[in-house]
Amino acid sequence: MVLTRVAGSFRDPAGFVFSRDGRLLRQVNRVHAETWDAVAASDLFPALWDAGLLVHHEEVDVALGDQRAHVVIEPERITTLSQPHEWAPGQLRAAALATLEVQRTALDHGMTLRDASAHNIQFHHGRPVFIDTLSFEPLVEGRPWIAHGQFCEQFLAPLALQTLVDPRLRRLLVARLDGVELDLASQLLPGRTKLRPGLAQHLHLHARARGRGGSGGGGGSSREATFSHNALVGLVDSLRRTVSKLEYRPSGTVWGDYYAEADHYVRDAMEAKVALVREHVATVAPEIVWDLGANTGRFADLAVEAGATTVAWDIDVGAVEKAWQELAAGSPRDLLPLVLDLTNPSPGLGWAHAERPSLADRGPVDLVLALALVHHLSIGANVPLPDVVAELARLGRHVVVEWVPKGDPKVDVLLSTREDVFADYTREVFVEAVDRHFETVSVSPLPQSDRELFLLRRRDD
């Protein structure tokens, strides 16, 4: 049994995440033993588990680790990993509030978070959960919250920019894993935000105190300041009030009302499409499904209903936000809406391009849904049909793909403002590309249209 360290788990001397014999494990190093034992002896972990705020873990045989191990734990596995730049603003807000609730609970138990990275939050069963079990330490009387600056850079600044300026500014999180520098955020935000007490205190004044390019790392507030327990609680409450007021209300999005306003499907065709997708999901019986170009998640829901953990990817942040709001308002479900531009997907980021996995690194998954997608990639984005099919094969072991020919109303719209230089956009070229990578399980025409639904199985599976 070989110990294989997870690529993104190497910066913390307290321990690391690794895999062994198909199990995901976490080692607590002996240098962190005193801190770990103090936290574990408190009631903090059970309190966070009961609140659904912390991923659950069990202690296992310490021999599963290496020679530095003090304790080895086995955390509950998060099925689908996501990154902050893939979240809609509402998800970033929910992740921020969850982090603050974790810190507030820690304070109640005489502990504190030494690390408030946005990467410590993942979405599990449709809810944000904290995953870095080694981020807690005993509270030192009078010491400020050292992760305050990190929280502001990774949560508050990007959330303020996305909700008060433009949601596309989430892309800044691709350029810098540690969030948005406070001085940059202060310059980009409208001047009126200096009159909002929370933003003035935690962002604008904080940025001025740091100076240009000041970085928080894991720290933030002045180390010379003395903070009582009540002051720390007040700081968390102030941040919570500030974050809670930063809401994104999407309107006029391209894809948010795609199916509600669709004029390219008659009722029979849509009902047939729903029935076929449901049937194909049942045939594959997947554990994990990616719906590429999911809009607000109508078809992704079919996979969730079948018991699959499902990611609803879409390029339109408004559509993803709507899907998130609906999910957050209901009962927990294994659905995760995320923002994705398939023509420029999430790359490998951080050290050695491996600290945060690319889209492809997180696949292949059991089933990919590619419904009303291919024509947008091939005609809308000039990606040749064979390349589109090859990428689908890289991402999914099975694929349900919708073929939309020229002459379809949606293809006509794409071609209405540009020259038709897509001579190879034909069913013959599509089928030839499919045959290179897949076995065709079934082909089903959609009634009252020229569209077809293909169920494909990758040849190497």
Image (cartoon, rainbow, N blue to C red):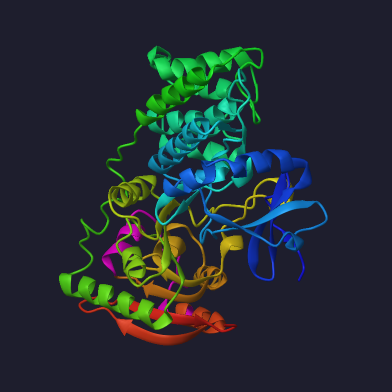
Quarter of the picture holding the N terminus: bottom right
Which residue is at the far left? 267
Residue drawn where x is 21% and y is 73% of the image: 271
Query: Could one spot residue 451 in this view of the protein?
Result: no
Quarter of the picture holding the C terminus: bottom right
Residue drawn where x is 63% and y is 24% of the image: 140
Q: Name the side, left or right, on which 451 lies relative to 97.
A: left
Answer with the quarter of the image where residue 151 lies: top right
Q: Name the side, left or right, on which 321 lies relative to 262.
A: right
**Where residue 447 appears, x then y in whole percent?**
22, 79
Query: Could one spot residue 351 in this view of the protein?
Result: yes
**Where residue 102 appears, x then y in whole percent?**
49, 38
**Where residue 345 appears, x then y in whole percent?**
54, 54
Which residue is at the far right? 67
Q: Which residues are magenta?
A: 408-429
Q: Name the side, left or right, on which 62 lies relative to 255.
A: right
Asked if the magenta segment contains residue 410, the reply would be: yes
Front-most of 166 and 39?
A: 39
Residue drawn where x is 39% and y is 32% of the image: 163
Asked if the magenta segment contains residue 241, the reply would be: no
Residue drawn where x is 73% and y is 48% of the image: 10
**Where residue 230 appears, x then y in whole percent?**
48, 19
